[in-house]
Amino acid sequence: MSKGQRLVRVHDVRHEIPHVISIDFEPCGMPPITSVDDHVKVVLPPDRSDPRHDDDSVSKPLLRTYTRRRWFEDGRWGIDVLQFGPETGAAAHDGPGTQWSRTVQPGDEVVVRGPGGHWQMPDDLTHLLVVADAVALPAVANTLAVLPRSAVATVILAGGHHDYPLTADERFTVVRVPRNPDGSHDPASVMSTVRELELPDDVHAFVHGEATMVRSVRRHLRLQRNLTKDHVHLSAYWFAGRDADGWRAIKKDFNQSMEAESGD
């Protein structure tokens, strides 16, 4: 087993939330969740062979990143894998991660890397802007769950009507931006919504989701709203028109280009 990897065993698989498969794992020495953006990478052997197989020279493993949504006192922890299709206002998706989530059973083993993540909610935060799509809903849920009691949140959710549960609170203003009629992503509508917002100068932003959406929102916040780098936490999860591995191949260059727009 390579350094930084763990062989974990599935404890439970549940379908309690519409269009969500919740997967909990047995204790494996994984630490508690300490950051809002806590996540792990699930290593999927492309030939569905022994999960401990991680020799890149033989068969490059497929990596799928998931937010850690739960951690229990006995060391168990869990992720939620969202399922997409016409009923959620999105194009159907049946990639390796989705296939794995639909077939995994209690007792199955899989290799994970992590956890990763570092972002902490600022102690002095008074207003949080969240811009995200359905893929990022578990991270959004983690974020809203630890929002300081004295703070408010404006939440812009792109991509249809996925029923993932978010904390209900009168401090949260939630605006849902639908997809195009054909189910395709519509970052222009998201940007139009963000531009119309009245936000305080000291707002912090949490921007997670499709790469072109993240880039457009970041450009607006940094260059037009003049937010400093430390007030904008972002993560591009996927790129419209590319599968997860195609996005991983260009992600580093994309992020560097995005940061260069504001001289970072």
Image (cartoon, grey):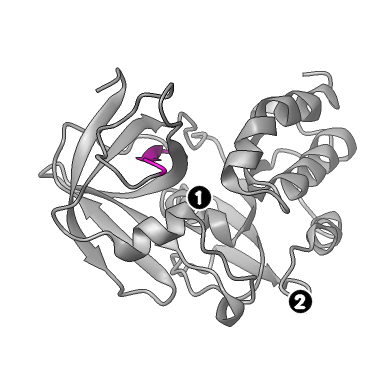
The secondary element bearing badge 2 is classed as loop
Q: Residue furthest left?
A: 74
Q: Residue furthest right?
A: 224
Position of the N terminus by quadrant: top left
Give the alpha-carbon distance from disc 1 to disc 2, as whole Å.
40 Å
Which quadrant would residue 152 be assigned to in this image?
A: bottom right
Residue 188 at what x, y percent from top left?
A: 85, 59
Q: Which residues are magenta?
A: 38-46
The secondary element bearing badge 1 is classed as loop
Total numbered circles = 2
Residue 149 at what x, y percent from top left?
A: 45, 52
Identify the residue shown where x is 42% and y is 43%: 46
Q: Main secondary structure of the magenta part?
A: strand
Numbered mark located on residue 69 in the image: none
Which quadrant would residue 183 be assigned to in this image?
A: bottom right
Q: Which residue is mark 1?
A: 150
Residue 189 at what x, y percent from top left?
A: 83, 64
Identify the residue shown where x is 25% and y is 33%: 52
Identify the residue shown where x is 50% and y is 50%: 150
Q: Is residue 240 or residue 122 the one in the foreground?
A: 240
Amino acid type of the residue tagged 2 in the rendering: Asp
Q: Which residue is mark 2?
A: 182
Q: Is residue 76 or residue 60 the one in the foreground?
A: 60
